[in-house]
Amino acid sequence: MTDAIALEPVGKREKTKAANRLAILAAAREVFAQLGYEAATVRDIIRGTQLASGTFYNYFKSKEEVYEALADDGARRFRPILRMARENARSFEDYLHSAFVAYFQFIVADNRTEGRPIDERRPHVLRMDTPEMMAVYQEVRQSLEEAVARGDAPRVDADYLACACIGTAQEVGAEMLRRSPPDIDAAARFVTGLLLNGLQGAARKS
């Protein structure tokens, strides 16, 4: 009983710390959506919470660190979705299309904040230079390597192809978000065709 009582405040403190961190990330997501990353300031983010400015700096040193945390959070949430696309794919083409659909659905949902329209000024959350995004990259690379080994995909450099898949998806996704409404399936078919068959494939599948 004594041990349980002693542990309770620690558990409560951990919950408070987690709640504060989530509040900061939620506020940053709102602020980046409304103002754009470049115009947003730490003060804007703090105003979006009920926390004191000192509390913010207990968790993050700058808006850049908040953005990196959002990047990792997005990649962390997307990775199991990507893995499911691989596990359910019936062919290499199906895997590519399913993965692109999953990513485009993810960024559409992630770029809507409390039902407001998408604001293209908000930067992408998924970046290549965070630990979680590197894990996503490895997930993609492994999937491509396995497809090449099975003979389902052409024998190409898996690193180059993984970079091409991720980079193309991010750029096409950015353009898709600027359209109203965003056409997820058209974007996924375009990128799939482009990667599999070049420009002729993209034209045929668009």
Image: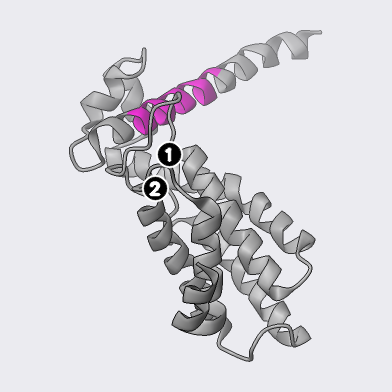
Q: Indicate left or right for 88 with 78 as reference.
A: right
| Quadrant showing the N terminus | top right
Distance from disc 1 to disc 2, alpha carbons, whole Å, reads 8 Å
Q: Nearer the viewer, residue 121 or 25?
A: 121
Which of disc 2 and disc 1 is earlier in sequence? 1
Q: Nearer the viewer, residue 27 or 117?
A: 117
Q: Amino acid at mark 1?
A: Asn
Q: Indicate left or right for 13 with 121 as reference.
A: right
Which residue is pictured at 50% across the width and 23% down the height?
17
Q: Position of residue 186 (x, y in %)?
A: 51, 58
Magenta residues (range): 16-30
Q: Position of residue 33 (x, y in %)?
A: 32, 34
Q: Position of residue 137 (x, y in %)?
A: 55, 65
As for residue 19 lying within the magenta part, the answer is yes
Give residue 189's quadrant in the image. bottom right
Q: In the structure shown, which secondary structural element does the residue marked by tag 1 occupy?
A: loop
